[in-house]
């Protein structure tokens, strides 16, 4: 659906050059929610603005439904942009216009007749949950409501893709979740492809199918959200995953809870997808003569399934311990032995 090839942006100021985006290639499928995560300065905003040519690339191409937008004339681009919706961190609403008129604005520009405009705006207001607020002005709305107006406005011309530039970064956690749920429901109802940029792993976890991690203008890791969460490769990705469960990566803190018997093993279990629902610990104690000391556990749902980790200490005879671990391994749950008996 969206093909990005060798995309680069070099900013050139009097004093210095900044390679904001460096040779990025990605394919984004129709109907998916694709997240790009990175720390401040990684190049995310530049990247998303290159997709609709709010920034001109220095190199590379962006094709949307096989049409190369990097080669379009300004007139063609204006037309194509009607099919690329965008929402912003600070909403970018027109403050002197009502909710209704803000949402109608892109339809006016596209030359849609008044009656049709009105019908469409009413439909969108309902879709984003703003019924009753038609005549309010942006200043009379909460942050979440303002972003709902931004979303409705972005959807006015039935876009093929929605670009979200840190769309929830100015919102409190609860409102963030409401807006994320709205994005998922729009994605499902309209089959809309969504590309979002964020610095919060929570946003990726909650709604994305796939993710790319950006660092210094480059994509350092990309993949299905569940895979990237369970097996993060780059140091940056590991730090982002850690945002979700900071304790999990502090294995040294577990030391206080380990009994340190001679015959004990400390293991870490990874439950992925349906395995996360499994009563594995019960199965183990029924089958083997071992004691289990649960040290720490967490579970995180993603759109692609849940993943959980559990640290346990097993106490028992050496051969029974190794049989227990064999049993866990053959059950499909991943085991990492952290300390051997
Ligand atoms: N118009 C510009 N002129 C010169 N340099 C720029 C310009 N816009 C961005 N940059 C530089 O490009 C790099 C990437 O910036 P960008 O805003 O794309 O990153 P980001 O990941 O979105 O960060 P943030 O979350 O802080 O916005 C930074 O070093 C930034 O200073």
Image (cartoon, rainbow, N blue to C red):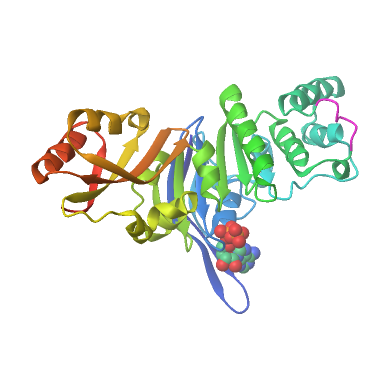
Image quarter for residue 120? top right
Residue 293 vertical placement versus 161 (above, below): below
In terms of secondary structure, what is the magenta stretch mainly? loop
Total labels: the figure holds: 0
Image quarter for residue 40? bottom right
- x%, y% of residue 182? 64, 31
- Using the rendered image of the protein, determine whether residue 67 is visible from the camera's viewpoint: no
Task: Identify the residue shown where x is 45% and y is 44%.
Answer: 211
Asked whether, in this view, residue 148 is left or right of residue 62, the answer is right
- x%, y% of residue 189? 60, 22
Residue 329 vertical placement versus 245 (above, below): above
The residue furthest left is 319
Q: Residue 170: say if magenta.
A: no
Image quarter for residue 82? top right
- x%, y% of residue 301? 46, 36
Is 327 in front, or is 168? 327
Task: Identify the residue shown where x is 77% and y is 41%.
Answer: 146
Residue 49 vertical placement versus 15 (above, below): above
Q: Quadrant of ligand 1?
A: bottom right
Asked whether, in this view, residue 106 is left or right of residue 334, the answer is right
Asked whether, in this view, residue 222 is left or right of residue 169, the answer is left
Task: Identify the residue shown where x is 69% and y is 47%.
Answer: 171
Asked whether, in this view, residue 161 is left or right of residue 326, the answer is right
Q: Which residues are magenta?
A: 131-136
Q: Residue 135: say if magenta.
A: yes
Task: Identify the residue shown where x is 73% and y is 30%.
Answer: 156
- x%, y% of residue 305? 42, 32
- Using the rendered image of the protein, determine whether residue 174 is visible from the camera's viewpoint: yes
Residue 230 vertical placement versus 182 (above, below): below
């Amino acid at each position: 659906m969206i093909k990005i090839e060798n995309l680069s942006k070099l900013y050139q100021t009097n004093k210095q050059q900044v390679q904001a985006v460096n040779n990025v290639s990605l394919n984004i499928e129709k109907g998916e929610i694709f997240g790009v995560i990175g720390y401040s300065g990684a190049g995310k905003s530049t990247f998303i603005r290159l997709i609709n040519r709010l920034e001109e690339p220095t190199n590379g191409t962006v094709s949307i439904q096989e049409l190369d937008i990097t080669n379009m004339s300004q007139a063609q681009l204006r037309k194509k942009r009607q099919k690329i919706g965008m929402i912003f961190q600070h909403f970018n609403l027109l403050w002197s216009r009502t909710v209704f008129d803000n949402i109608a604005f892109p339809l006016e520009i596209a030359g849609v007749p008044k009656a049709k405009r009105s019908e469409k705006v009413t439909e969108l207001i309902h879709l984003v949950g703003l019924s009753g607020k038609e005549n309010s002005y942006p200043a009379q709305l909460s942050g979440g409501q303002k972003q709902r107006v931004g979303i409705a406005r972005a959807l006015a011309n039935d876009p093929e893709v929605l670009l979200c530039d840190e769309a929830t970064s100015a919102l409190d956690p609860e409102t963030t979740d409401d807006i994320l749920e709205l994005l998922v429901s729009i994605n499902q109802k309209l089959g809309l492809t969504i590309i979002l940029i964020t610095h919060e792993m929570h946003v990726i976890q909650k709604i994305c199918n796939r993710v790319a991690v950006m660092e210094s203008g480059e994509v350092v890791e990309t993949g299905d959200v569940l895979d990237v969460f369970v097996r993060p490769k780059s140091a940056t990705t590991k730090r982002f995953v850690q945002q979700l469960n900071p304790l999990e990566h502090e294995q040294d803190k577990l030391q206080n809870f380990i009994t340190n018997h001679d015959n004990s093993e400390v293991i870490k279990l990874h439950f992925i997808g349906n395995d996360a629902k499994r009563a594995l610990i019960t199965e183990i104690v029924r089958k083997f003569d071992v004691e289990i000391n649960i040290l720490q556990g967490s579970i995180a749902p993603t759109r692609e399934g849940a993943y959980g980790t559990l640290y346990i200490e097993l106490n028992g005879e050496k051969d029974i311990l190794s049989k227990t671990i064999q049993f866990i391994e053959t059950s499909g749950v991943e085991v990492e032995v952290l300390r051997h008996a």
